Image (tube, rainbow, N blue to C red):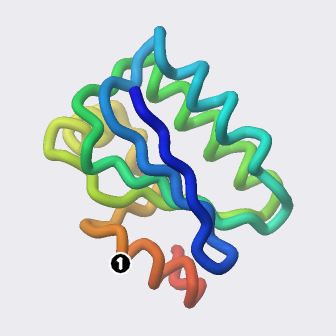
Amino acid sequence: MDIQIKQIDNIIIAHISGELNQKTSPALQERLIPLIQPDCKILLEMSNLSSLSSAGLRILLLLYRQINAGQGQVVLAGLTEMVEDTMSITGFLTFFTAYKTLDEGIAALRHNLIT
């Protein structure tokens, strides 16, 4: 798994690629948890994520809960069909707002359009 993090305005963007599983999910946690602040805005760009296991889902839920607890916002962008299907079947998409593209996710966070 590869994680590239950048910031645009007040939005933290994490480009996640490769496999998010039991072996790689601790790296995502180590990179993103320290960035969570009150009222933060985080976008997880996942267009190059090739697989998502239950351990990966657990980390995403952990991030969601910590960001939400601080009144922050987290959105997903660029979900592949496989990742979207996995998240939908397991019910995890009910926790997140997902956008087709990175630009749509950024625009929603900039204009506080998250529901």
Q: Which residue sits furthest top? A: 23
13 or 6, nearer to the observer: 6
Q: Which residue sits furthest left? A: 81
Q: Secondary structure at mark 1?
A: helix
Residue 85 image offset from top left, x and y in percent: 20, 39
Query: Quarter of the image containing the N terminus?
Result: top left
Q: What residue is at 52 percent from the left and 84 percent from the top?
A: 113
How many callouts does the rendering have? 1
To which residue does mark 1 refer?
A: 104
Whether 16 is drawn above or below 109: the answer is: above
Residue 66 image offset from top left, x and y in percent: 74, 44
Q: What residue is at 61 percent from the left and 62 percent from the top?
A: 12
Residue 88 relative to residue 8: left or right: left
Whether 50 is drawn above or below 115: the answer is: above
13 or 98, nearer to the observer: 13
Q: Which residue sits furthest bottom? A: 111
Residue 22 image offset from top left, x and y in percent: 47, 11
Examine the image and state in which quarter residue 102 appears: bottom left
Residue 4 image offset from top left, x and y in percent: 49, 46
Whether 49 is drawn above or below 111: the answer is: above
6 or 86, nearer to the observer: 6
**Mark 1, residues whose alpha carbon is within 10 Å: few (<14), some, or many (≥20)?**
some
Q: What residue is at 14 percent from the left and 45 percent from the top?
A: 81
Amino acid at pointer 1 = Glu
Q: What residue is at 25 percent from the left and 38 percent from the top?
A: 83
Residue 36 relative to residue 99: left or right: right
Examine the image and state in which quarter residue 17 appears: top left
Residue 27 relative to residue 17: left or right: right
